[in-house]
Amino acid sequence: MGSQEQNREKTQAAILDAAEALLREGGVEALTAGAVAQRVGLARNSLYRYVESMDELRGRVILRHFPDYVDAINQAIHEATTPTEALCAYISTNVQIVAVENHGWLMELAQGVGGEAEANIAHIHRQLIESLSNLLIPFDLDNPTLAAALIQGLLSTGFNALERGHDVQEVNALCVRGALGIVGKPQ
């Protein structure tokens, strides 16, 4: 990789870091081209060599977190030795990620983001639901897609409970219990 490419990547990373810091500090309203450019040390018009719009930049901030989330979930699933352990790992890893990473903040940021970022976020969520549906195949359910949607709904409710300050272990235990009930494997 040439030095020009390295500089471009370094600048793009600095732009993402600055944008994320601004979003965490002041929400969507704080994300302006002027504020990002100032933090990175670029002229405002130079910023647009790296990003098309502030909405696109907001989408990049959101999307930068997803690969690690998906990798952590997949690793936990692959370490499980039984279908029940895999389902519990899927639930527990999701709950732990949300508890640590402030998923609610990311979901708030995602509201109203359009274009490619919106499509990518939707695609990642579909992949997670598909992964969950595949985990449910060994349970020989009549409708694994519906079961996956119900479990994902249970997780979403758990995520909201975490955002309201409920205990991580309690939320995790109830989500696991609910998911096991849905697949007919009560604890």
Image: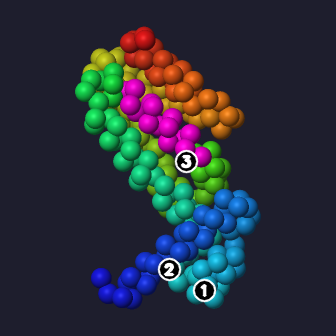
Label 1 or label 3, whichever comes before in sequence order: 1
Range drawn in magenta: 87-102
Q: Nearer the viewer, residue 93 or 70?
A: 93
Mark 3, Cα crowd under 10 Å, few <14 / some 14-19 / many 20+, is few
Q: State the scheme by which the image is colored.
A: rainbow
State the CA–CA distance, disc 1 to disc 3.
Answer: 29 Å
Using the image, determine if residue 27 lies above or below residue 38. Answer: above
Using the image, determine if residue 18 lies above or below residue 23. Answer: below
Residue at image mark 1? 42
Q: Are marks 1 and 2 in contact (CB under 8 Å)?
A: yes
From the image, give the main secondary structure of the stretch colored magenta.
helix
Label 2 or label 3, whichever comes before in sequence order: 2
Residue at 69% over, 76% down: 35
Amino acid tagged 3: Glu
Which of label 1 and label 3 is nearer to you?
A: 3
State the CA–CA distance, disc 2 to disc 3.
Answer: 25 Å
Amino acid tagged 2: Thr
Using the image, determine if residue 82 lies above or below residue 6. Answer: above
Residue 176, given in percent of the width and then of the height, sits at: 47, 22
Say which quadrant the C terminus sits in.
Answer: top left
Q: Secondary structure at mark 2?
A: helix
Amino acid tagged 1: Leu
Residue at 32% over, 41% down: 75
Residue at image mark 3? 101
Residue 99 among magenta residues: yes
Judge whether residue 178 can be spotted in this image.
yes
Residue 25, given in percent of the width and then of the height, sits at: 70, 61
Mark 1, Cα crowd under 10 Å, few <14 / some 14-19 / many 20+, is some
Q: Secondary structure at mark 3?
A: helix
